[in-house]
Image (cartoon, helix red, strand yellow):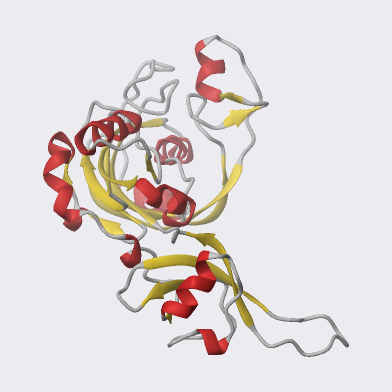
Amino acid sequence: MDGVLVVDKPAGPTSHDMVDRARRAFGLRRVGHTGTLDPFATGVLPLCLGRATRLARFLGEGEKVYRATVRLGVATSTDDLTGTPLSDPRDVSLEERAVRQALGQLVGTLDQLPPAYSARRVEGRRLYELARRGEAVPRSARAVTIHGIELLGFEGDQAEIEVRCSPGTYIRALARDVGETLGVGGHLTALRRTRSGDFGLEGAVPGDDIAAGRDQVVPLGELLPGVPVVRVGPAGRDRVRHGRDLGRDDVVAGFPEGVVERVRILDESGDLLALAVPRRSEASGAPAVEPALHPDLVFVS
């Protein structure tokens, strides 16, 4: 079984727990996911099955969409509801306009400091491992992009938001930063991922019944729909199988005329044979070389 199963992860289990459930349900050894969700978080968790694990780094590159609840008035050690409060709760008397303005200041590309309890590595060790041992280590901020934040509701000390962001963004850190911007502190109390790249809740199966999703696995040939398709016949398939470059004469349809970063090589039945990168001579004064496609990730054996 090769492809992606989109799971609606329930609150409680870790992302790795969901991977283990899929291994047991389908009798597979090779299962992975495209982006961790914290145990208390729910929502879209794409699971890569079989050969699809080799595509995980590409599948995880797309925009993420989250719905979150931020409690204002107190920060915690983990930036979420599982942590220890860092102070007594403050009374929150804020106008909705102030909250909107604070959220607006966090839209764009910014350097985000990861939570102290996170999977980010420092000198080969996870931050959460160091934090649990009481070791204080400097954390390096990393550039992330917040494409948009919508305030869905605000009442008392609770703000409901929807966030569109780049991979690698910590929504817990965003909750912390909103609280700091408003001068009252804040932390995340609920999180639900509604989209991860090409995958949304509309195609997800319940995480408590993964085995029921056998017929909903997205096959390899339908993954990465934003990557251009090149189709080959039997001769082209044989060249791909041996890792040989494809020229125009080896392609049935779709040989790229413009500049592309990568293409999908499909056979005439729609099966994914490989991902390929264009090759052409760009050196000044070099003799012209006929463009070719080099299979750099081959799936056909």
Along the viewing direction, whichever of 93 and 292 lies nearer the viewer? 292
Q: Is residue 66 above or below residue 86?
A: below
Along the viewing direction, whichever of 220 and 95 lies nearer the viewer? 220
**In the rendered view of the protein, which quadrant contains the C terminus?**
bottom left
The residue located at (41%, 25%) in the rendering is: 75
- Report the number of discs: 0
The residue located at (28%, 60%) in the rendering is: 219
Give the x, y percent position of residue 174: 43, 41
Q: Is residue 242 above or below residue 287?
A: above
Q: Is residue 290 visible?
A: yes
On screen, residue 185 versus residue 294, left or right, reads: left
Q: Is residue 154 visible?
A: no
On screen, residue 68 versus residue 233, left or right, reads: left
Along the viewing direction, whichever of 261 and 221 lies nearer the viewer? 221
Along the viewing direction, whichever of 240 and 26 lies nearer the viewer? 240
Give the x, y percent position of residue 237: 46, 73
The residue located at (41%, 47%) in the rendering is: 53
Give the x, y percent position of residue 189: 28, 31
On screen, residue 58 versus residue 130, left or right, reads: left
Give the x, y percent position of residue 184: 41, 31
The residue located at (62%, 16%) in the rendering is: 136
